[in-house]
Amino acid sequence: MRTLTTRLTPAVLILLAVTLMVFHKMDALPVEQMRVALTDKMAPVMSAVSEPFVALTDSFDGIATLRQLRAENMQLREENAKLQKWYENALRYQAENQSFRELLNVKADPALTYVTTRVVSDPGGSFVKSVLLPVGENDRVSKGNAVMSGQGLIGRVTEAGARSSRVLLVTDLNSHIPVTIQNTRTKAILAGKNTDLLKLERLPQDSGLTVGQRVVTSGDGGQLPPDVPIGVIVEVGAEGVFVKPLSEIEKVTYVQVINADVDRGLSTGEISTPVDKHSSKRK
Amino acid sequence: MSMAFGANDGWQGSTASMLGRWAMTAAFIIVLLVLSTFPFKIGHFGEIRPSFMLMAIYYWAIMRPSTLSPIATFIVGLAFDLMGGFPLGLNAMTLLIVQWGTRRQRKFVLGQGFIVLWMGLALVTLGAGLFQWLIYSSFHQNFELASLKPVLTSVVMTTAIFPLIVLPLSAFNKSLAERE
């Protein structure tokens, strides 16, 4: 009898796992709440345990040859010179923009607040592209918030606990973000493909896209603030239009959560479409 | 290259030493779980992400099946699923199948040298990777196949790093055996 039970246990458990997966797929289980409960408990532990590993990887990063440093320095100098010019331009545009706004009596977008934090884990690896942050509702982070690294959007908060939150990265298969092509204002959906590149979907026909155009959030759906840069078009071909994210998403260590209480529709002046509703829910 | 395997089949000893072993195993697994979810980003090598949990389950299934019962494996897998944002049950199922399948081949592998143990791991990792890849893809709304490249990278990394991981695993086995 005992041997029979021992033999059957794995089979029963495998069956149970399959059942759990089916229930999860059918949204019949409060998986999100269970996750939040566990990650809230584990986030401080993981943050503490990962401390020595952070130091280790940081020290690896610190080892660079003199030649590399020189090359990097040169590149940074050039970039700095360019940015100085841009900075002047930006100041000029800002003043101009301000005066136009006053002329038109535009109601400005609500001010955004930021929470900057370190990524404590990104466990998914091969399949699930998500990261865990040690900030949560206590830090005014909530579900739907945009998450950026220095250069651009990397994802958005899909689960928020009291002290931790999970970010679904733009590269995940389940990520669909309403976007606009910056200079043509063409609207599309930017979908993750589990690869380094993102794909533009639901494009209008003959949209005339070219390599090098910038892709920003459209703000449709009211979840993400508009005009947050995401990436640049790098491929326009028979297989579709592909976008390379501005941030090196796989290498991000520090991120900013943008806490935007965007008044729906106000920021874009358009009727919100519930187009990204399904993607905010993990399937 | 062959190794001395301290194979052992069954719980023995007093309740106190059993509790001690249980606590050690739990601590060891928590470390493995954290390692599995930690983003190692080393310089220009990019991400390094082998499946530590899978290596341990495989190793134990051959060397010391009593270390982790199927029920414990199931719980560990579920914890991993919840922490990692995987479809619930995906890792629980994969780890259970790996454990069950490996235990059936245990006698064969035990009689061979380290190379066979290593090759066995490569096969198991590849199988598990492809299996998870298929299940995860089918979990997507339109049954869209995810990219296979990261899966294969992880398989290669897991196989490459296994000889290093065997050292702490066999040391852990020894200290468990000493407490019996």
Image: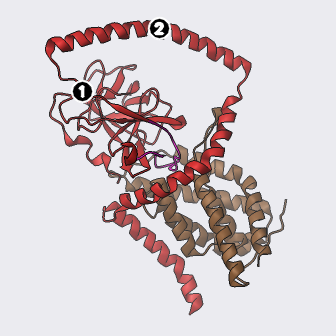
Chain colours: A red, B brown
Residue located 59% across and 56% down the image: B126
Q: Tell me, yes or no, whether the highlighted magenta stretch contains residue A123.
A: yes
Q: Secondary structure at mark 2?
A: helix
> Where A1 falls versus A79 (above or below)?
below
> Where the N terminus of chain A falls, by quadrant?
bottom right
Answer whether residue A174 is visible to the viewer in this image: no
Q: Residue at x 44, y 6 (%)?
A: A85
Q: Any mark on residue B26, and which? A: none
**Dominant SS in magenta:** loop
Badge 2 and badge 1 both on one subunit: yes
The answer to whether residue A82 is magenta is no
Q: Give the crowd class for mark 2: few <14, some 14-19, many >=20 residues within 10 Å.
A: few
Instruction: Give the residue type that dot 1 points to.
Output: Asp
> Which range of residues does the magenta coloring cover?
A116-136
Q: Residue at x 74, y 72 (%)?
A: B176
Q: Mark 1 — on which chain does it sit?
A: A
Say whether residue A49 is left or right of residue A16. right
**Residue located farthest toward the front when viewing the structure as drawn:** A138
Q: Which mark is residue A84?
A: 2
Q: Separation of disc 2 and disc 1 at Cα?
A: 27 Å
**Looking at numbered disc 2 in the image, what kind of residue is underneath it?**
Gln
In the image, which is nearer the foreground, mark 2 or mark 1? 1
Residue wearing tag 1: A109
Which residue sits at x=48%, y=49%?
A127
Taking A108 as reference, is B141 left or right? right
Camera-nearest residue between B5 and A247: A247
Circles 2 and 1 in contact, beta carbons < 8 Å: no
